[in-house]
Image: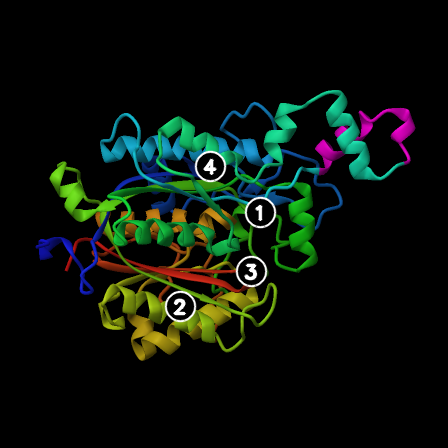
Amino acid sequence: MSDNRFTDHLGRPIIAVTGMGVITSLGQGLQDNWAALTSGTSGIHKITRFPTEGLSTRISGTVDFIDVPVENAVERSYAFARETTAEAIAQAGLSGDFEGPLFLAAPPVEPEWSARFALADRAPPSQVEGDAYDRFLTAMRQRPDPAFLEAVQFGSISERLSDRFGTRGLPVTLSTACASGATAIQLGVEAIRQGRTDRSLVVATDGSVSAEALIRFSLLSALSTQNDPPEKASKPFSKDRDGFVIAEGAATLVLESLESAVARGAKVLGILKGCGEKADHFHRTRSSPDGGPAIATIRAALEDAGMDETAIGYINAHGTSTPENDKMEYGSMLAVFGERLKDIPVSSNKSMIGHTLTAAGAVEAVFSIQTMLTGTLPPTINYVNPDPTIVLDVVPNQKRDQQVRAVLSNSFGFGGQNASLVMTLEPA
Protein backbone atom coordinates (compact mmCIF):
# COMPACT_ATOMS: atom_id res chain seq x y z
CA MET A 1 0.00 0.00 0.00
CA SER A 2 1.42 3.38 -0.99
CA ASP A 3 1.98 6.11 1.59
CA ASN A 4 -0.55 8.86 0.82
CA ARG A 5 1.88 11.45 2.14
CA PHE A 6 3.66 11.01 -1.14
CA THR A 7 0.74 10.91 -3.58
CA ASP A 8 -1.46 13.66 -4.98
CA HIS A 9 -5.23 13.98 -5.33
CA LEU A 10 -5.19 11.48 -8.22
CA GLY A 11 -2.96 8.97 -6.48
CA ARG A 12 0.11 9.92 -8.51
CA PRO A 13 3.57 10.50 -7.05
CA ILE A 14 4.08 14.06 -5.84
CA ILE A 15 6.92 15.67 -7.80
CA ALA A 16 9.60 17.52 -5.86
CA VAL A 17 12.25 19.88 -7.19
CA THR A 18 15.55 19.18 -5.46
CA GLY A 19 18.05 20.99 -7.67
CA MET A 20 18.10 24.10 -9.87
CA GLY A 21 20.65 25.85 -12.05
CA VAL A 22 20.33 28.92 -14.25
CA ILE A 23 22.24 31.15 -16.65
CA THR A 24 20.89 34.34 -18.20
CA SER A 25 22.28 37.63 -19.40
CA LEU A 26 22.30 38.64 -15.72
CA GLY A 27 25.04 36.12 -14.92
CA GLN A 28 25.88 32.53 -14.12
CA GLY A 29 24.31 30.66 -11.23
CA LEU A 30 21.11 31.00 -9.25
CA GLN A 31 22.58 33.23 -6.55
CA ASP A 32 23.91 35.91 -8.90
CA ASN A 33 20.82 35.80 -11.11
CA TRP A 34 18.44 36.14 -8.21
CA ALA A 35 20.35 39.04 -6.68
CA ALA A 36 20.30 40.90 -10.00
CA LEU A 37 16.70 40.03 -10.82
CA THR A 38 15.32 41.19 -7.47
CA SER A 39 17.34 44.40 -7.61
CA GLY A 40 15.70 45.29 -10.91
CA THR A 41 18.90 45.00 -12.92
CA SER A 42 18.62 44.56 -16.68
CA GLY A 43 20.84 42.22 -18.67
CA ILE A 44 19.89 43.74 -22.02
CA HIS A 45 22.79 45.35 -23.88
CA LYS A 46 24.09 46.31 -27.30
CA ILE A 47 25.10 43.33 -29.41
CA THR A 48 28.85 42.91 -29.88
CA ARG A 49 28.95 39.31 -31.12
CA PHE A 50 28.28 40.25 -34.74
CA PRO A 51 27.85 43.44 -36.77
CA THR A 52 24.43 45.06 -36.44
CA GLU A 53 24.72 47.91 -38.94
CA GLY A 54 21.53 48.14 -40.96
CA LEU A 55 19.50 46.06 -38.51
CA SER A 56 16.43 47.65 -36.93
CA THR A 57 17.15 45.83 -33.66
CA ARG A 58 20.69 46.05 -32.28
CA ILE A 59 20.20 44.91 -28.69
CA SER A 60 19.83 41.57 -26.99
CA GLY A 61 20.30 39.58 -23.81
CA THR A 62 23.17 37.49 -25.18
CA VAL A 63 25.29 35.42 -22.81
CA ASP A 64 28.86 36.28 -23.73
CA PHE A 65 30.74 35.17 -20.62
CA ILE A 66 30.78 31.39 -21.22
CA ASP A 67 33.71 30.12 -23.30
CA VAL A 68 32.83 27.93 -26.28
CA PRO A 69 35.25 26.08 -28.58
CA VAL A 70 33.37 27.11 -31.74
CA GLU A 71 31.08 30.10 -32.17
CA ASN A 72 27.75 28.56 -33.11
CA ALA A 73 24.33 28.08 -31.54
CA VAL A 74 24.83 24.40 -30.70
CA GLU A 75 28.11 24.94 -28.86
CA ARG A 76 26.68 27.89 -26.93
CA SER A 77 23.49 26.02 -26.08
CA TYR A 78 25.47 22.99 -24.93
CA ALA A 79 27.82 25.08 -22.80
CA PHE A 80 24.93 26.84 -21.06
CA ALA A 81 23.16 23.52 -20.45
CA ARG A 82 26.31 21.87 -19.13
CA GLU A 83 26.90 24.63 -16.58
CA THR A 84 23.29 24.81 -15.32
CA THR A 85 23.07 21.03 -15.07
CA ALA A 86 26.25 20.82 -13.00
CA GLU A 87 24.80 23.47 -10.66
CA ALA A 88 21.43 21.73 -10.32
CA ILE A 89 22.89 18.28 -9.68
CA ALA A 90 25.25 19.69 -7.05
CA GLN A 91 22.37 21.45 -5.29
CA ALA A 92 20.38 18.21 -5.35
CA GLY A 93 23.25 16.47 -3.57
CA LEU A 94 23.69 13.83 -6.24
CA SER A 95 26.98 12.35 -7.34
CA GLY A 96 28.02 9.81 -9.95
CA ASP A 97 25.69 8.91 -12.80
CA PHE A 98 22.31 10.61 -12.68
CA GLU A 99 20.47 7.33 -13.39
CA GLY A 100 17.30 8.92 -14.70
CA PRO A 101 15.98 10.13 -18.07
CA LEU A 102 16.97 13.45 -19.68
CA PHE A 103 14.43 15.79 -21.25
CA LEU A 104 16.02 18.66 -23.15
CA ALA A 105 14.44 21.72 -24.73
CA ALA A 106 16.80 23.03 -27.40
CA PRO A 107 16.53 25.58 -30.22
CA PRO A 108 15.99 24.43 -33.80
CA VAL A 109 19.38 23.59 -35.26
CA GLU A 110 20.50 25.44 -38.37
CA PRO A 111 24.04 26.40 -39.39
CA GLU A 112 24.66 30.12 -39.32
CA TRP A 113 25.26 31.90 -42.62
CA SER A 114 28.94 32.45 -41.94
CA ALA A 115 29.43 28.70 -41.54
CA ARG A 116 27.50 27.97 -44.73
CA PHE A 117 29.57 30.45 -46.73
CA ALA A 118 32.81 29.07 -45.32
CA LEU A 119 31.79 25.53 -46.25
CA ALA A 120 30.73 26.56 -49.75
CA ASP A 121 34.05 28.32 -50.28
CA ARG A 122 35.85 25.05 -49.64
CA ALA A 123 34.13 23.36 -52.59
CA PRO A 124 36.39 22.61 -55.61
CA PRO A 125 36.26 25.07 -58.51
CA SER A 126 34.32 22.63 -60.68
CA GLN A 127 31.47 22.77 -58.17
CA VAL A 128 31.34 26.54 -57.67
CA GLU A 129 28.30 27.05 -59.89
CA GLY A 130 26.51 23.89 -58.82
CA ASP A 131 23.70 23.30 -56.36
CA ALA A 132 24.62 24.69 -52.92
CA TYR A 133 23.98 21.42 -51.10
CA ASP A 134 26.04 19.48 -53.63
CA ARG A 135 28.86 21.89 -52.92
CA PHE A 136 28.43 21.41 -49.16
CA LEU A 137 28.55 17.63 -49.47
CA THR A 138 31.56 17.69 -51.77
CA ALA A 139 33.46 19.95 -49.36
CA MET A 140 32.58 17.71 -46.38
CA ARG A 141 33.71 14.55 -48.21
CA GLN A 142 37.03 16.12 -49.10
CA ARG A 143 37.75 17.38 -45.60
CA PRO A 144 35.52 16.22 -42.74
CA ASP A 145 34.61 18.98 -40.28
CA PRO A 146 33.54 17.50 -36.92
CA ALA A 147 32.68 20.93 -35.48
CA PHE A 148 30.32 21.71 -38.35
CA LEU A 149 28.75 18.24 -38.15
CA GLU A 150 28.12 18.72 -34.44
CA ALA A 151 26.49 22.06 -35.18
CA VAL A 152 23.89 20.64 -37.56
CA GLN A 153 22.68 17.64 -35.54
CA PHE A 154 19.56 18.32 -33.51
CA GLY A 155 20.28 15.59 -30.96
CA SER A 156 23.93 16.37 -30.34
CA ILE A 157 23.34 18.56 -27.27
CA SER A 158 21.27 15.97 -25.42
CA GLU A 159 23.66 13.15 -26.30
CA ARG A 160 26.62 15.08 -24.93
CA LEU A 161 24.72 15.95 -21.76
CA SER A 162 23.66 12.33 -21.35
CA ASP A 163 27.24 11.12 -21.67
CA ARG A 164 28.57 13.73 -19.26
CA PHE A 165 26.00 13.29 -16.49
CA GLY A 166 25.11 9.63 -16.86
CA THR A 167 21.40 9.82 -17.63
CA ARG A 168 19.45 6.66 -18.41
CA GLY A 169 17.82 5.66 -21.68
CA LEU A 170 17.65 7.65 -24.89
CA PRO A 171 17.61 11.39 -24.16
CA VAL A 172 14.59 13.27 -25.48
CA THR A 173 15.12 16.57 -27.34
CA LEU A 174 12.12 18.76 -28.04
CA SER A 175 11.42 22.16 -29.52
CA THR A 176 7.99 23.68 -28.99
CA ALA A 177 8.93 27.33 -29.49
CA CYS A 178 8.57 29.59 -26.45
CA ALA A 179 6.80 26.84 -24.48
CA SER A 180 9.71 24.40 -24.83
CA GLY A 181 11.11 24.76 -21.31
CA ALA A 182 7.72 24.22 -19.69
CA THR A 183 7.00 21.29 -22.04
CA ALA A 184 10.27 19.62 -21.05
CA ILE A 185 9.29 19.99 -17.40
CA GLN A 186 5.93 18.40 -18.14
CA LEU A 187 7.64 15.40 -19.75
CA GLY A 188 9.89 15.03 -16.71
CA VAL A 189 6.88 15.18 -14.41
CA GLU A 190 4.95 12.59 -16.41
CA ALA A 191 7.88 10.16 -16.48
CA ILE A 192 7.84 10.06 -12.67
CA ARG A 193 4.05 10.02 -12.37
CA GLN A 194 3.88 7.03 -14.69
CA GLY A 195 6.30 5.08 -12.51
CA ARG A 196 9.01 4.90 -15.17
CA THR A 197 11.63 6.52 -12.93
CA ASP A 198 12.17 8.05 -9.51
CA ARG A 199 13.95 11.09 -10.90
CA SER A 200 14.31 13.01 -14.14
CA LEU A 201 16.67 15.67 -15.41
CA VAL A 202 15.03 18.59 -17.21
CA VAL A 203 17.18 21.03 -19.16
CA ALA A 204 16.20 23.97 -21.38
CA THR A 205 18.80 25.99 -23.23
CA ASP A 206 19.07 28.55 -26.00
CA GLY A 207 22.20 30.18 -27.39
CA SER A 208 20.80 30.93 -30.82
CA VAL A 209 20.98 34.72 -31.09
CA SER A 210 22.41 35.59 -34.49
CA ALA A 211 21.98 38.22 -37.19
CA GLU A 212 19.69 35.84 -39.05
CA ALA A 213 17.53 35.33 -35.95
CA LEU A 214 17.15 39.08 -35.53
CA ILE A 215 16.22 39.52 -39.18
CA ARG A 216 13.62 36.74 -39.07
CA PHE A 217 11.92 38.04 -35.93
CA SER A 218 12.09 41.60 -37.25
CA LEU A 219 10.25 40.52 -40.40
CA LEU A 220 7.47 39.37 -38.07
CA SER A 221 7.50 42.80 -36.37
CA ALA A 222 8.07 40.92 -33.11
CA LEU A 223 11.22 42.64 -31.80
CA SER A 224 11.58 45.91 -29.97
CA THR A 225 13.37 48.60 -31.97
CA GLN A 226 13.88 50.87 -28.96
CA ASN A 227 17.64 50.37 -29.01
CA ASP A 228 18.72 53.26 -26.82
CA PRO A 229 19.05 52.74 -23.95
CA PRO A 230 18.97 48.93 -24.26
CA GLU A 231 17.92 48.27 -20.68
CA LYS A 232 14.68 50.24 -21.20
CA ALA A 233 13.48 48.31 -24.27
CA SER A 234 11.58 45.45 -22.65
CA LYS A 235 8.50 46.91 -20.96
CA PRO A 236 5.80 44.26 -20.51
CA PHE A 237 2.23 45.48 -19.99
CA SER A 238 3.24 49.10 -20.67
CA LYS A 239 1.39 51.28 -23.14
CA ASP A 240 4.52 52.02 -25.18
CA ARG A 241 5.74 48.42 -25.50
CA ASP A 242 6.75 47.60 -29.05
CA GLY A 243 8.14 44.06 -29.04
CA PHE A 244 10.25 41.55 -27.19
CA VAL A 245 14.01 41.57 -26.69
CA ILE A 246 15.62 38.36 -27.90
CA ALA A 247 17.91 36.74 -25.36
CA GLU A 248 19.82 33.63 -24.36
CA GLY A 249 20.03 31.45 -21.28
CA ALA A 250 19.46 28.05 -19.78
CA ALA A 251 17.95 26.36 -16.76
CA THR A 252 18.07 22.87 -15.30
CA LEU A 253 15.76 21.28 -12.74
CA VAL A 254 16.22 17.99 -10.93
CA LEU A 255 12.78 16.44 -10.46
CA GLU A 256 12.12 13.41 -8.30
CA SER A 257 9.28 11.79 -6.49
CA LEU A 258 8.75 13.30 -3.07
CA GLU A 259 9.11 9.82 -1.60
CA SER A 260 12.53 9.40 -3.18
CA ALA A 261 13.66 12.86 -2.09
CA VAL A 262 12.60 12.30 1.51
CA ALA A 263 14.15 8.83 1.59
CA ARG A 264 17.58 10.15 0.66
CA GLY A 265 17.31 13.23 2.87
CA ALA A 266 17.27 15.74 0.03
CA LYS A 267 16.14 19.31 0.57
CA VAL A 268 12.84 19.90 -1.24
CA LEU A 269 12.88 23.30 -2.92
CA GLY A 270 9.35 23.18 -4.28
CA ILE A 271 6.63 20.98 -5.72
CA LEU A 272 5.65 20.69 -9.39
CA LYS A 273 1.95 20.46 -8.69
CA GLY A 274 0.29 20.71 -12.09
CA CYS A 275 0.97 21.01 -15.82
CA GLY A 276 -1.33 22.13 -18.60
CA GLU A 277 -0.75 22.21 -22.34
CA LYS A 278 -3.07 23.15 -25.21
CA ALA A 279 -2.56 23.83 -28.90
CA ASP A 280 -3.72 26.93 -30.72
CA HIS A 281 -4.47 26.49 -34.44
CA PHE A 282 -5.31 30.15 -35.08
CA HIS A 283 -2.04 31.21 -36.80
CA ARG A 284 1.59 30.16 -37.20
CA THR A 285 2.85 32.97 -34.98
CA ARG A 286 -0.13 34.88 -33.58
CA SER A 287 -2.22 33.70 -30.65
CA SER A 288 -5.98 33.40 -30.93
CA PRO A 289 -7.34 36.89 -30.13
CA ASP A 290 -10.01 35.52 -27.81
CA GLY A 291 -7.33 33.74 -25.75
CA GLY A 292 -9.34 30.51 -25.78
CA PRO A 293 -6.37 28.08 -25.92
CA ALA A 294 -4.42 30.08 -23.30
CA ILE A 295 -7.45 30.09 -20.99
CA ALA A 296 -7.81 26.33 -21.44
CA THR A 297 -4.10 25.86 -20.72
CA ILE A 298 -4.24 27.72 -17.40
CA ARG A 299 -7.38 25.85 -16.36
CA ALA A 300 -5.82 22.53 -17.34
CA ALA A 301 -2.79 23.25 -15.15
CA LEU A 302 -5.00 24.14 -12.19
CA GLU A 303 -7.12 21.03 -12.70
CA ASP A 304 -4.02 18.85 -12.96
CA ALA A 305 -2.81 20.36 -9.70
CA GLY A 306 -6.15 19.69 -7.98
CA MET A 307 -6.46 23.40 -7.16
CA ASP A 308 -8.77 26.23 -8.06
CA GLU A 309 -7.85 29.77 -9.01
CA THR A 310 -8.21 31.07 -5.44
CA ALA A 311 -5.08 29.16 -4.39
CA ILE A 312 -2.70 31.06 -6.69
CA GLY A 313 -0.79 33.81 -4.89
CA TYR A 314 1.53 34.98 -7.69
CA ILE A 315 1.75 34.69 -11.46
CA ASN A 316 5.01 34.60 -13.38
CA ALA A 317 3.65 35.92 -16.64
CA HIS A 318 4.84 35.07 -20.13
CA GLY A 319 4.93 38.87 -20.44
CA THR A 320 6.88 39.25 -23.67
CA SER A 321 6.37 43.01 -24.15
CA THR A 322 4.74 42.56 -27.55
CA PRO A 323 1.51 44.55 -27.98
CA GLU A 324 -0.61 41.57 -28.98
CA ASN A 325 0.74 38.87 -26.66
CA ASP A 326 0.54 40.96 -23.49
CA LYS A 327 -3.06 41.89 -24.31
CA MET A 328 -3.99 38.26 -25.02
CA GLU A 329 -2.34 36.99 -21.83
CA TYR A 330 -4.10 39.62 -19.73
CA GLY A 331 -7.46 38.66 -21.21
CA SER A 332 -6.74 34.99 -20.58
CA MET A 333 -5.80 35.54 -16.96
CA LEU A 334 -8.83 37.78 -16.45
CA ALA A 335 -11.10 35.05 -17.82
CA VAL A 336 -9.72 32.57 -15.29
CA PHE A 337 -9.23 34.75 -12.20
CA GLY A 338 -11.94 37.35 -12.73
CA GLU A 339 -12.02 40.40 -10.47
CA ARG A 340 -9.47 38.78 -8.16
CA LEU A 341 -6.77 39.20 -10.83
CA LYS A 342 -6.12 42.83 -9.94
CA ASP A 343 -5.08 41.71 -6.45
CA ILE A 344 -2.69 38.94 -7.60
CA PRO A 345 0.93 40.07 -8.12
CA VAL A 346 1.91 39.39 -11.74
CA SER A 347 5.44 40.09 -12.90
CA SER A 348 7.50 39.45 -16.00
CA ASN A 349 11.13 38.34 -15.70
CA LYS A 350 11.53 39.18 -19.39
CA SER A 351 11.59 42.88 -18.52
CA MET A 352 15.12 42.22 -17.20
CA ILE A 353 16.48 39.13 -18.95
CA GLY A 354 14.66 39.41 -22.27
CA HIS A 355 12.96 36.48 -23.94
CA THR A 356 15.16 33.39 -23.70
CA LEU A 357 12.96 31.60 -26.23
CA THR A 358 13.43 27.81 -25.89
CA ALA A 359 14.78 28.20 -22.36
CA ALA A 360 12.13 30.64 -21.09
CA GLY A 361 9.67 28.19 -19.51
CA ALA A 362 12.36 26.50 -17.41
CA VAL A 363 14.18 29.72 -16.51
CA GLU A 364 10.93 31.21 -15.27
CA ALA A 365 10.02 28.02 -13.39
CA VAL A 366 13.31 28.30 -11.49
CA PHE A 367 12.60 31.94 -10.67
CA SER A 368 9.04 31.04 -9.63
CA ILE A 369 10.29 28.50 -7.11
CA GLN A 370 12.91 30.96 -5.89
CA THR A 371 10.13 33.51 -5.38
CA MET A 372 8.38 31.14 -2.98
CA LEU A 373 11.58 30.10 -1.23
CA THR A 374 12.72 33.64 -0.51
CA GLY A 375 9.41 35.43 0.00
CA THR A 376 10.51 38.02 -2.55
CA LEU A 377 8.55 38.97 -5.67
CA PRO A 378 10.80 40.16 -8.50
CA PRO A 379 9.65 43.37 -10.18
CA THR A 380 8.53 44.20 -13.67
CA ILE A 381 10.92 47.00 -14.58
CA ASN A 382 10.40 49.83 -17.07
CA TYR A 383 6.80 50.14 -15.93
CA VAL A 384 6.40 53.92 -16.16
CA ASN A 385 3.61 54.23 -18.71
CA PRO A 386 0.90 51.70 -17.76
CA ASP A 387 -1.45 50.39 -20.40
CA PRO A 388 -4.87 51.52 -19.15
CA THR A 389 -6.52 48.51 -20.82
CA ILE A 390 -4.39 46.08 -18.78
CA VAL A 391 -5.24 46.39 -15.11
CA LEU A 392 -2.59 44.36 -13.26
CA ASP A 393 -0.43 44.55 -10.18
CA VAL A 394 2.83 44.03 -12.06
CA VAL A 395 5.08 44.57 -8.99
CA PRO A 396 6.21 47.76 -10.69
CA ASN A 397 9.91 48.59 -10.82
CA GLN A 398 10.87 47.39 -7.34
CA LYS A 399 10.83 44.00 -5.64
CA ARG A 400 8.27 43.26 -2.96
CA ASP A 401 8.60 41.19 0.19
CA GLN A 402 5.58 38.90 0.20
CA GLN A 403 5.33 35.22 1.00
CA VAL A 404 3.39 33.17 -1.53
CA ARG A 405 2.84 29.44 -1.46
CA ALA A 406 1.47 28.73 -4.95
CA VAL A 407 2.61 30.14 -8.29
CA LEU A 408 1.31 29.93 -11.85
CA SER A 409 3.89 30.29 -14.62
CA ASN A 410 2.73 30.81 -18.21
CA SER A 411 4.54 30.05 -21.49
CA PHE A 412 2.63 30.90 -24.66
CA GLY A 413 4.65 30.37 -27.83
CA PHE A 414 4.73 30.61 -31.59
CA GLY A 415 3.14 27.79 -33.51
CA GLY A 416 0.22 27.57 -31.09
CA GLN A 417 2.30 26.06 -28.27
CA ASN A 418 0.84 26.90 -24.86
CA ALA A 419 1.98 25.51 -21.50
CA SER A 420 1.33 26.50 -17.89
CA LEU A 421 2.84 25.18 -14.68
CA VAL A 422 1.53 25.30 -11.12
CA MET A 423 4.17 25.14 -8.41
CA THR A 424 3.78 25.13 -4.66
CA LEU A 425 6.17 25.59 -1.79
CA GLU A 426 5.22 22.30 -0.21
CA PRO A 427 2.67 19.48 -0.60
CA ALA A 428 -0.88 20.22 0.45
**Residue 229: assigned label:** 1
Q: Where, quadrant-wise, is the C terminus in this rendering? A: bottom left
Q: Position of residue 169 (x, y in %)?
A: 38, 38
| Picture residue at 31% right of the left edge, 63% below the top | 345
Q: Which residue is disc 2 drawn over?
A: 297
Q: Amino acid at mark 3?
A: Phe
Considering the numbered disc 3 on the image, is that residue within a helix, a strand or a loop? helix
Q: CA distance from mark 2 to mark 1?
A: 36 Å
**Residue 167: assigned label:** none
Name which of mark 4 and mark 2 comes first in the sequence: 4
Name which of mark 2 and mark 1 comes first in the sequence: 1
Which residues are drawn in magenta?
A: 113-129
State yes or no: discs 2 and 1 in contact (Cβ < 8 Å). Answer: no
| Camera sees residue 112 | yes
Observer-nearest residue: 115 or 129?
A: 129
Mark in the foreground, 1 or 3: 3
Q: Amino acid at mark 4?
A: Ser
Considering the numbered disc 4 on the image, is that residue within a helix, a strand or a loop? helix
Observer-nearest residue: 390 or 72?
A: 72
Indicate whether residue 127 is drawn in magenta: yes
Q: Where, quadrant-wise, is the N terminus in this rendering? A: bottom left
